[in-house]
Image (cartoon, grey):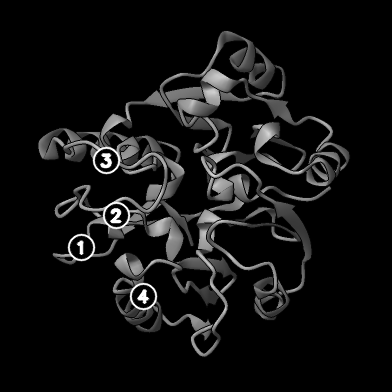
């Protein structure tokens, strides 16, 4: 039986929100004034919830002028000690790339993707449910063709996921692996073909409704048997997760949702 990433993960990377603001709009959710102290408190609460599950949280110093660097999930995708680096579609975020590269090099990761031209936004559009299965989103931010090169980082099956709703511009806004056989997901964000693929590969997948999707419930992160999610998980979804042996920890992510991000966006699985 395949072991889920959520059962195996030992450490993650986070970037404190010291310079987090909403200064531009590169996705449909962006807008509003950030309450900085509240954002820090929310970030701290998420970090504590992850550490409570026995996972070590490493931190990378934020850089002034790069307000979205806090969403470190977008920095790349990791398999063992290999990292395939992101190449951001929007110039507003491209300044983050060199800082991620320096961190990965200093932490002895083998670097891939630094010489390629395809757009790819890391863990925002790609995630492992187990380390033999990569869910590979493409659409508004990442190129479909990039996944032929992402295969360089390991031996795994790539499941291509066609994102069709601009509001769900990254895979992690509409899909969260839960163990090896389930996920929280929002079907309307995907093409019909991708919906069929998800249902066939994940027999225990849990569909969220429109209200939950808008609350970024799918931008959760599963650690051990706990699904750490933004506030808004319905009782129906909680019951479905409970039947699979999972609990839910809801964390207020309201400040980060002003920029179109939440729990998963703030965390890179190492």
**Residue at the spot x=45%, y=38% of the render?**
53
Number of residues whose C-alpha sits closer than 10 Å to that of mark 2, classed few (under 14), some (14–19) or many (20 or more)? many
Residues marked 1 and 4 touching at CB (< 8 Å): no
- Give residue 62's mark: 1
Which sits in the foreground, 194 or 126?
A: 194
Q: Residue furthest bottom?
A: 115
**Pointer 4: what residue?**
97
Residues marked 3 and 1 touching at CB (< 8 Å): no
**Residue at the spot x=53%, y=41% of the render?**
173
Sequence-wise, the earlier of marks 4 and 2 is 2
- Real-space Cα separation, disc 4 to disc 3, in angstroms: 22 Å
Secondary structure of residue under mark 4? helix
Residues marked 2 and 1 touching at CB (< 8 Å): yes
Which sits in the foreground, 46 or 139?
A: 139
Front disc: 2 or 3: 2
Sequence-wise, the earlier of marks 1 and 4 is 1
- Real-space Cα separation, disc 2 to disc 3, in angstroms: 10 Å
Q: Residue furthest left?
A: 37
**Pointer 2: what residue?**
70
- Real-space Cα separation, disc 1 to disc 4, in angstroms: 12 Å
Q: Residue furthest top?
A: 235
Secondary structure of residue under mark 3? helix
- Real-space Cα separation, disc 4 to disc 2, in angstroms: 13 Å
Q: Considering only vertical position in the picture, is 167 above or below 239?
A: below
Q: Is residue 121 left or right of residue 199?
A: left
**Pointer 3: what residue?**
43
């Amino acid at each position: 039986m395949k072991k889920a990433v959520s059962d195996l993960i030992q450490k993650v990377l986070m970037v404190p929100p010291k310079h987090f603001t909403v200064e531009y709009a590169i996705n449909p959710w962006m807008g509003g004034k950030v309450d900085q102290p509240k954002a820090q408190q929310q970030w701290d609460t998420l970090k504590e919830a992850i550490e409570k599950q026995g996972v070590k949280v490493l931190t990378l110093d934020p850089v002034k002028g790069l307000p979205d660097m806090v969403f470190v999930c977008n920095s790349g995708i990791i398999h063992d000690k290999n990292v395939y680096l992101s190449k951001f579609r929007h110039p507003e975020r491209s300044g983050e790339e060199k800082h991620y590269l320096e961190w990965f090099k200093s932490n002895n990761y083998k670097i891939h993707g630094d010489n390629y031209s395809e757009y790819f936004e890391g863990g925002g559009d790609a995630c492992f449910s187990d380390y033999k299965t990569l869910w590979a989103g493409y659409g508004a931010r990442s190129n479909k063709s990039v996944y032929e090169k992402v295969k360089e980082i390991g031996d795994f099956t790539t499941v291509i996921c066609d994102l069709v709703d601009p509001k769900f511009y990254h895979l992690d806004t509409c899909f969260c692996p839960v163990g090896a056989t389930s996920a929280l997901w929002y079907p309307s964000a995907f093409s019909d073909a991708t919906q069929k693929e998800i249902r066939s590969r994940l027999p225990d997948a849990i569909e969220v409704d429109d209200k939950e999707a808008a609350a970024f419930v799918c931008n959760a992160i599963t650690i051990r048997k706990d699904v750490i999610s933004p506030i808004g998980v319905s009782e129906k979804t909680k019951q479905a997760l409970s039947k699979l042996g999972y609990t839910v920890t809801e964390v207020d992510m309201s400040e980060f949702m002003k920029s179109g991000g939440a729990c998963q966006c703030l965390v890179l699985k190492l």
